[in-house]
């Protein structure tokens, strides 16, 4: 929610001036507001200017001047009313502008339709262009200064002036990359002997994303490893570090990454991997901020084949073993007599159980 503040400016006792932003105005409307001023249309109202003659005499030959100022960019633009549309207000007369187009008049004289001469500064042009490019709106303070001048014998005098300000802020949501929960669920228990992992997240196309995948069993400090990788520049010559536990550190040009066949063998059954995505985003002030996804984990399943399948058949039988396989059994841990063994011990426990069955020391009851 934007908070507006109206500057306390001494006004002429003859002319009362009021400027207010539309109640629904938000910082996401900045680009459209500048377009409305530049194109001088009121298809959508962003601000309203009202001037009223509070004196007992006629206030002749009045002009409106609007200046938009940014704390970061300085003066963005100035819109100065030309000789067209000069207005005179009778006592009690009132004129209202929606953006820079007249919407209400009473008890006044006006020469033609108001037109405004625009002057956009070079920094203002950069701001407007960056807004149109979709760059992030950053912390800033914008002020709309309005003054009414009176032309008396080709001399301009300021009758009154008023300003309103609002702050913008970098949205925290822009620093979060949402992950595809369906893909996250599919990774859990993935049989890497049959298919390579695919990672997916929410984001724009044609934007570079950095994906880092870590072997949590090998990494000494997972948090420190992720921080170290993201703090450094990406290098195609350093996309893997087996000793440190970095499985892959790659750049994707889309919000998804399918592990290519040449890297499929990097993932092992029964291991836990952590992954995170980073992307740089540009603000309208030409600064870069970093957005991150949550750090997520998945554990791959032991492939039910070879010695493991043979041991399961010896213990549970062919039919039950096939059911395990069809139901996506994850041999990431095993529990015997209430004690849970890690994935590294699964094969040893299965061998012991098969040996005891063979020696009639153990019987499996379905």
Image (tube, rainbow, N blue to C red):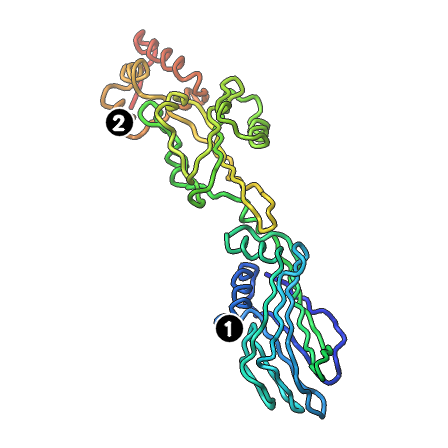
Q: Which residue lies furthest to the top in this view?
A: 359
Residue 334 visible in rendering: no
Q: Name the foreground residue: 188 vs 35.
A: 35
Q: Earlier in the sequence, mark 1 or mark 2?
A: 1
Q: Mark 2 points at which residue?
A: 323
How far apart marks 1 and 2 lie (CA) works out to: 68 Å
Can you give x and y, in whole percent of width and height, for residue 257 in the image? 40, 34
Residue at 72%, 89% in the rendered image: 55
Can you give x and y, in whole percent of width and height, for residue 145 in the image? 67, 69
Q: Mark 1 points at which residue?
A: 42
Q: Residues within 10 Å of mark 2 (few under 14, many from 20)?
A: few
Give the foreground label among 1 and 2.
Answer: 1
Residue at 66%, 64% in the rendered image: 143
Q: Name the foreground residue: 269 vs 2.
A: 2
Can you give x and y, in whole percent of width and height, for residue 103 in the image? 53, 80
Location of the C terminus by quadrant is top left
Q: Hey, which quadrant is residue 305 in on the image?
A: top left
| SS of the residue under disc 2 | helix
| SS of the residue under disc 1 | loop
Residue 95 visible in rendering: yes
Q: In this view, does 263 lie above or below 122?
A: above
Residue at 51%, 35% in the rendered image: 295
């Amino acid at each position: 929610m934007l908070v507006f503040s109206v500057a306390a400016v001494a006004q002429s006792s003859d002319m009362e001036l009021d400027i207010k932003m539309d109640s629904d105005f938000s910082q996401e409307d900045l680009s459209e507001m500048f377009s409305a001023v530049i194109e001088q249309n009121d298809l959508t109202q962003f601000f309203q200017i009202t001037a009223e003659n509070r004196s007992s005499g006629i206030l002749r030959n009045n002009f409106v001047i609007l200046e938009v100022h940014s704390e970061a960019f300085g003066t963005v633009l100035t819109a100065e009313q030309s000789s067209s549309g000069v207005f005179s207000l009778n006592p009690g007369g009132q004129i209202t502008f929606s953006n820079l187009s007249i919407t209400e008049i009473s008890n006044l004289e006006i020469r033609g339709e108001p037109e405004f001469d625009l002057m956009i500064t070079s920094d203002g042009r950069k701001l407007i262009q960056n807004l149109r490019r979709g760059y992030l709106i950053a912390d800033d303070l914008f002020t709309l200064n309005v003054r009414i001048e009176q032309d008396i014998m080709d001399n301009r005098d300021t009758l009154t002036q008023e300003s309103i300000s609002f702050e913008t802020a970098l949205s925290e949501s822009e620093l979060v990359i949402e992950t595809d929960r369906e893909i996250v669920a599919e990774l859990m228990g993935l049989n890497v002997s049959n298919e390579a992992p695919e990672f997916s997240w929410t984001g724009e196309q044609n934007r570079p994303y950095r994906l880092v995948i870590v072997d949590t069993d090998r990494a000494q400090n997972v948090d420190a490893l992720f921080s170290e990788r993201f703090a450094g520049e990406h290098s195609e010559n350093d996309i893997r570090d087996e000793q440190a536990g970095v499985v892959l550190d790659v750049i994707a040009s889309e919000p998804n990454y399918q592990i290519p066949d040449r890297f499929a063998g990097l993932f092992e059954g029964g291991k836990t991997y952590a992954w995170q995505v980073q992307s740089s985003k540009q603000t309208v002030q030409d600064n870069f901020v970093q957005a991150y996804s949550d750090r997520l984990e998945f554990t791959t399943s032991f492939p039910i084949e070879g010695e493991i399948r043979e041991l399961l058949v010896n213990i549970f039988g062919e039919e039950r073993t096939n059911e395990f396989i069809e139901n996506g059994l994850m041999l990431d841990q095993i529990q015997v007599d209430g004690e849970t063994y890690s994935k590294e011990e699964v094969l040893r426990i299965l061998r012991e159980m098969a040996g005891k069955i063979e020696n009639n020391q153990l019987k499996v009851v379905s």
